[in-house]
Amino acid sequence: TTPSGATYDTSDDHKPGKIEKEGSTYVLVPSKTVGLETGEVVEGTTEVTYVYQLAKGDVVVNYVDESGNPISGAETGGNTSVKDEDQADTGKDYNTTDKRPDTITTADGTKYTYVTVQDGSAPEIGKVTEAPNTVTYVYRKVVAVETTTTTTGTVIVHYQDTEGNTIARDETDTDKVVVSTTVTKTEDGEVVSSKTTPSGATYDTSDDHKPG
């Protein structure tokens, strides 16, 4: 019997670095290969086993204003970016909506309200992939306006006889004096607070509008 001298090499076209299966990514672990990748073909079956493990991936959430500038507040833990999944198995379901606050108030008191998911962003709900999934939430700066209004009061003195007839021209003792001041704060046109403070103004008609 004369050997044929035929050889084999499984590493050339039967050794993919990655395998995709049902939304999950598996990566080759070279150190766990079982059997010889190259050699002489012998009678019977020669087996080579390549071992793969699930790839890992991150899901990151970013917070930006409408100009794309990063923002943060107590609602985001003081961070402009947070991780929803850290080196999770690929194919795992993720959902970042629990990291989407309705409003964010920055350290300087500026308030922002949620608008939308940024164009080109990863979806809020999906599956972990080997490449990072980055979900970017866009917030609009809330327009806060503070207005001040006042109410006024006037005191008029009348002169009548015992029958109720006018006997002298009316006189103004106090004319349009501020009675109270109201400060109203609105955010995007919606009233969020209003405070009215009395002026404490007084009057006395007996001093110069009470002839004997």
Image (tube, rainbow, N blue to C red):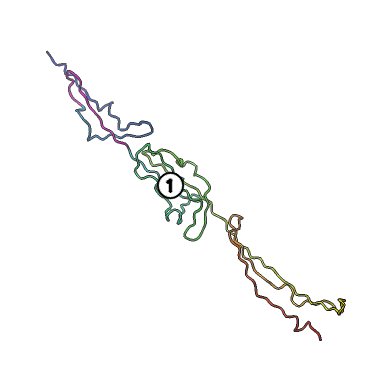
- Looking at this view, name the residue that lies furthest to the front: 163
- Does 49 appear in magenta? yes
Q: Quadrant of the C terminus?
A: bottom right
Report the residue at 49% width, 54% height from top.
104
Q: Position of residue 41 (x, y in %)?
A: 18, 20
Q: Tag 1's secondary structure?
A: strand
Q: Quadrant of the N terminus?
A: top left
Give, as a three-letter code, the residue at label 1: Val
Report the residue at 55% width, 55% height from top.
142
Give the magenta-colored segment's residue range: 38-54
Q: Position of residue 152 (x, y in %)?
A: 71, 70
- Looking at this view, name the residue that lies furthest to the bottom: 212
Choose top left, top right, bottom left or bottom right for residue 150. bottom right
Q: How many neighbours does mark 1 have within 10 angstroms: few (below 14), some (14-19), or many (20 or more)?
A: many
Q: Is residue 119 left or right of residue 211?
A: left
Quick check: 40 above or below 199? above
Question: Where is mark 1, residue-wise?
Answer: 61
- Main SS of the magenta segment? loop
Quick check: 176 above or below 95? below
Choose top left, top right, bottom left or bottom right for residue 185. bottom right
Report the residue at 41% width, 49% height from top.
82
Choose top left, top right, bottom left or bottom right for residue 128. top left
Q: How many marks?
A: 1
Report the residue at 42% width, 55% height from top.
77
Q: Position of residue 146 (x, y in %)?
A: 60, 62
Quick check: 57 above or below 209? above
- Does 96 appear in magenta? no
Q: Is residue 81 left or right of residue 109?
A: left
Quick check: 201 above or below 33? below
Q: Is residue 136 left or right of residue 58?
A: right
Q: Position of residue 29 (x, y in %)?
A: 26, 35
